[in-house]
């Protein structure tokens, strides 16, 4: 016979189990692990660093790549897994830290090294980072159309404007 | 299944027109289309997934699953490619075909484009030929296409054009800023710039409103349905006759012939995956150059062991498209006004008449460049990554103009479509295998065109320029694909006659870009449409009740 107290205790435990299933130790990412995502962010941020405007990872390029790796870029999974692992290994052997904790100069050196040693993966990374930064926000990158604003494009785009030049002075 | 008068394979630029012309003439028509019917509501304005930037797939088909092709590169090494890969030479697979998402430049070829061999002579190793029909034969049908599809523009600025009886039905869109910069520069160079013709409403036309001039045009479906393709012009007319039935997501596997060697029916796989057979008095193939050739080659039988129309090994040969070259100019003032579609001004001065070159091509400014397009159009010497690249994007995105154009391709018989002996698609059909390249003279023309584009940009005030000129390893067919079922009077050197009827099978027709003998120095859509009207007129003229006699 199960009494009310036992049922309540059981459901609380079940609830905790569900919660831990979501959060405990597992990645927030669709495909990458937390460490892989951190390394990828380092690489993406060398390709598009921050200045007055956000860097690639701040604009969501890693989210973009991660999401595509479970979709159209399924075919690039191995390239990412192997490429990131190689970078992590190299970083540990040379600087004795994980890429995410290396100094900015070390991180840049890491990217330059990757461009030399594994140009195929680095080119892939450049393309995907650019897509995540300059592409449509719907895919997880270009957060809040930040790159389009950076280029001076209207966001949201204005419609029916400027068909006829009715105003004086500079536009757009 | 009940027999119909005509079955048409492919609801693109040509198929839609043939369906309309035949059903309006009283024939019962079944129109088979392997893709879906998208509408303006399917316009997603997705910079990474459309028909031009396909890194995340084709927006309007075909999908990446189960639709491979085999491309043989310059060294003779075959490789399998996905539809979203540029080397696939894709054209959209949907109702409307390429015309749902094209940039909609709607050019007439020039009279010389139909007489290339007599004008220039064929360069050694090329298969340059004359069309069996002339510009004058096609002129009334160009006009019909311009009025029924709906074209805006203004040819009055150029003397380099064929004679025409009426202007295009709509005025051009108001000029954008690039037009204002390039027009006086062209005049200073002694050129004749004008508003290029486009299948786009500039004023309300045909029951639909005008262009709202957004940033997302070439490669996208139009959000306001102001872009005119077969899906929003001729196809609704065809369906309204009550005689045309459109069946979407139907993949044709084979054209069946009877024991007298005439086409009897079409076998296809419907949207549920069931095999069907549609008997018809006449069969019209309008599946675009690569897929039309593939279907003919896949339709093998005892009487036609090499495929239909292929007795003289002509099906699939002379594959061509356009070799695009041009230049990007960088300015110290803003050239970008965010007013679409962008492409607005053209010159046709260089299409013909340059000594030493077999033709040339039209030059026009490019459609609005989305940021993702600009990533690799930065000045020569810009690093590919890093802060400098990012800063160059900021500096040049609004201060650059691209001028480019389709170069007249010199065809070769070796550039061809065959069916691959090993690779099959998800329905088990052998896929298209594309090999060969254009004649090298094409690249000479392309290089000359790039320098002309550069000169125009410099005259317009570009502080520096970068040339876009290259020699491709494979034939560039893509959305402008043409030439695989040549039109001609001699059955040994062509596949169809001047009425687009396959030489050896009198009730089988190929009506689409495949029949183009040369592809001109222009975007081919309007010519495909004019040929479709022309061939439909001949077909209707020869239609004698239920039995077709030519």
Image (cartoon, rainbow, N blue to C red):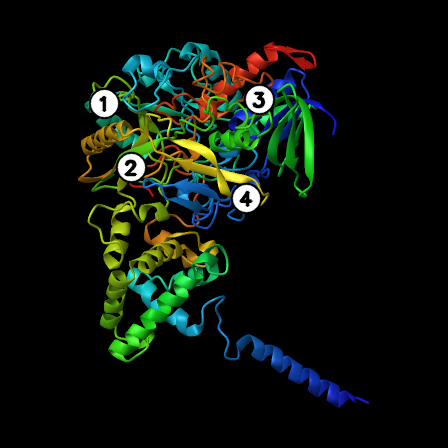
Q: Which of the 4 image quarters holds residue B102?
A: top left
Label 2: which secondary element:
strand
Q: What residue do we see at 27% from left, 34% from top?
A: B326
Whole-percent x and y of residue B295?
54, 32
Return the chain for callout 3.
B
The Cα–Cα distance between marks 2 and 3, rounded to whole angstroms, is: 36 Å
Q: Residues within 10 Å of mark 3 (few under 14, many from 20)?
A: many
Label 4: which secondary element:
loop
Q: Are marks 1 and 3 on the same chain?
A: yes
Give the mark nearer the N terminus: 3 vs 4: 3
Give the mark nearer the N terminus: 1 vs 4: 1
The Cα–Cα distance between marks 3 and 4, rounded to whole angstroms, is: 28 Å
- Residue bearing mark 3: B18
The Cα–Cα distance between marks 1 and 4, rounded to whole angstroms, is: 52 Å
- In this rendering, the answer to whether B482 lies above or below B144 is below
The Cα–Cα distance between marks 4 and 2, rounded to whole angstroms, is: 38 Å
The Cα–Cα distance between marks 1 and 2, rounded to whole angstroms, is: 18 Å
Compare residues B57 and A136 and report the one nearer the observer: B57
Q: Nearer the viewer, mark 2 or mark 3?
A: 3
Label 1: which secondary element:
helix
Q: Nearer the viewer, mark 3 or mark 4?
A: 4
The Cα–Cα distance between marks 1 and 3, rounded to whole angstroms, is: 41 Å
Horizontal side of residue A85 vs B441, given as left or right: right
- In this rendering, the answer to whether B504 lies above or below A43 is above
- Residue bearing mark 2: B402
Specify the label residue B187 is tagged with.
Answer: 1
- Residue bearing mark 4: B425
Compare residues B488 and A33 and report the one nearer the observer: B488
- In this rendering, the answer to whether B393 lies above or below B466 is below
Q: What residue do we see at 33% from left, 32% from top?
A: B323
Q: What residue do we see at 40% from left, 74% from top?
A: A35
Horizontal side of residue B299 vs B168, given as left or right: right
């Amino acid at each position: 016979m199960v009494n009310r107290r036992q049922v309540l205790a059981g459901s609380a435990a079940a609830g905790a189990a569900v919660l831990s299933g979501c959060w405990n130790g597992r990645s927030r990412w669709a495909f990458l692990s937390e460490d892989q995502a951190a390394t990828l962010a380092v690489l993406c941020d060398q390709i598009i660093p921050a200045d007055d405007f956000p860097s690639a990872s701040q604009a969501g390029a890693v989210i973009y790549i991660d999401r595509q790796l479970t979709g159209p870029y399924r075919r690039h999974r191995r390239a990412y897994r192997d490429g990131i692992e190689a970078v992590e290994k190299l970083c540990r052997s040379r600087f004795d830290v994980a890429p995410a904790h290396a100094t900015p100069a070390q991180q840049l050196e890491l990217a330059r090294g990757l461009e030399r040693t594994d140009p195929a993966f680095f080119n892939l990374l450049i393309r995907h980072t650019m897509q995540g930064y300059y592409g449509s926000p719907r895919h997880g990158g270009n957060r809040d159309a930040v790159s389009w604003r950076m280029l001076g494009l209207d966001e949201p785009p204005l419609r029916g404007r400027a068909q006829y030049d009715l105003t004086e002075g500079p536009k757009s | 299944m009940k027999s119909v008068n005509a079955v048409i394979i492919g609801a693109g630029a040509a198929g839609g027109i043939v369906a309309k012309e035949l059903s309006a003439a009283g024939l019962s028509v079944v129109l088979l289309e392997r893709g879906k019917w998208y509408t303006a509501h399917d316009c997603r304005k997705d910079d990474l997934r459309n028909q031009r930037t396909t890194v995340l797939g084709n927006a309007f088909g075909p999908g990446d699953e189960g639709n491979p092709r085999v491309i043989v590169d310059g060294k003779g090494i075959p490789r399998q490619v996905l539809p979203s890969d540029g080397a696939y030479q894709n054209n959209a697979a949907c109702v409307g075909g390429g015309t749902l998402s094209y940039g909609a430049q709607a050019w007439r070829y020039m009279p010389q484009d139909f007489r290339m061999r007599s004008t220039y002579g064929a360069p050694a190793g090329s298969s340059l030929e004359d069309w069996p029909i002339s510009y004058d034969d096609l002129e009334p049908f160009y006009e019909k296409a311009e009025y029924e599809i709906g074209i805006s523009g203004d040819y009055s600025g150029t003397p380099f054009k064929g004679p025409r009886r009426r202007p295009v039905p709509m005025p051009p869109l108001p000029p954008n800023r690039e037009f204002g910069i390039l027009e006086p520069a062209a005049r200073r160079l002694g050129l004749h710039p004008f508003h290029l013709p486009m299948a786009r409403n500039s004023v309300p036309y045909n029951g639909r409103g005008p262009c709202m001039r957004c940033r997302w045009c070439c490669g996208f479906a139009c959000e306001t349905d102001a872009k005119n393709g077969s899906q929003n012009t001729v196809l609704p007319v065809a369906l309204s006759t009550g005689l045309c039935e459109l069946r979407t997501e139907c993949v044709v596997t084979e054209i069946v012939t009877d024991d007298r060697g005439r086409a009897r029916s079409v076998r296809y796989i419907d949207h549920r995956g069931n095999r069907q057979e549609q008997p018809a008095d006449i069969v019209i193939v309008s599946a675009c150059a690569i897929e039309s050739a593939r279907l003919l080659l896949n339709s093998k039988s005892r009487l036609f062991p090499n495929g239909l129309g292929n007795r003289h090994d002509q099906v699939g040969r002379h594959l061509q498209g356009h070799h695009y070259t041009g230049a990007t100019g960088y300015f110290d003032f803003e050239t970008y006004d965010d007013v679409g579609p962008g492409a607005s001004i053209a010159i046709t001065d260089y299409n013909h008449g340059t000594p030493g070159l077999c033709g040339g091509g039209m030059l026009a400014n490019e459609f609005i460049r989305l940021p993702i397009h600009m990533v690799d159009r930065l000045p020569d010497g810009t690093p590919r990554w890093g802060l400098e690249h990012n800063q160059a994007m900021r500096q040049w995105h609004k201060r650059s103009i691209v001028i480019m154009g389709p170069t007249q391709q010199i065809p070769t018989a070796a550039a061809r479509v065959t069916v691959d002996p090993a690779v099959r698609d998800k329905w088990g059909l052998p896929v298209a295998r594309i090999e060969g390249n254009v004649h090298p003279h094409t690249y000479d023309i392309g290089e000359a065109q790039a320098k002309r584009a550069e000169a125009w940009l410099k005259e317009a005030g570009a502080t520096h320029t970068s040339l876009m000129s290259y020699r491709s390893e494979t034939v560039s067919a893509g959305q402008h694909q043409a030439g695989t079922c040549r039109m001609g009077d001699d059955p040994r050197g062509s596949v169809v006659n001047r009425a687009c009827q396959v030489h050896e099978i009198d009730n089988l027709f190929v009506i689409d870009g495949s029949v183009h003998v040369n592809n001109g120095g222009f975007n081919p859509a309007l010519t495909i449409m004019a040929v479709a009207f022309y061939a439909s007129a001949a077909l209707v003229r020869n239609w004698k009740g239920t039995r077709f006699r030519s």
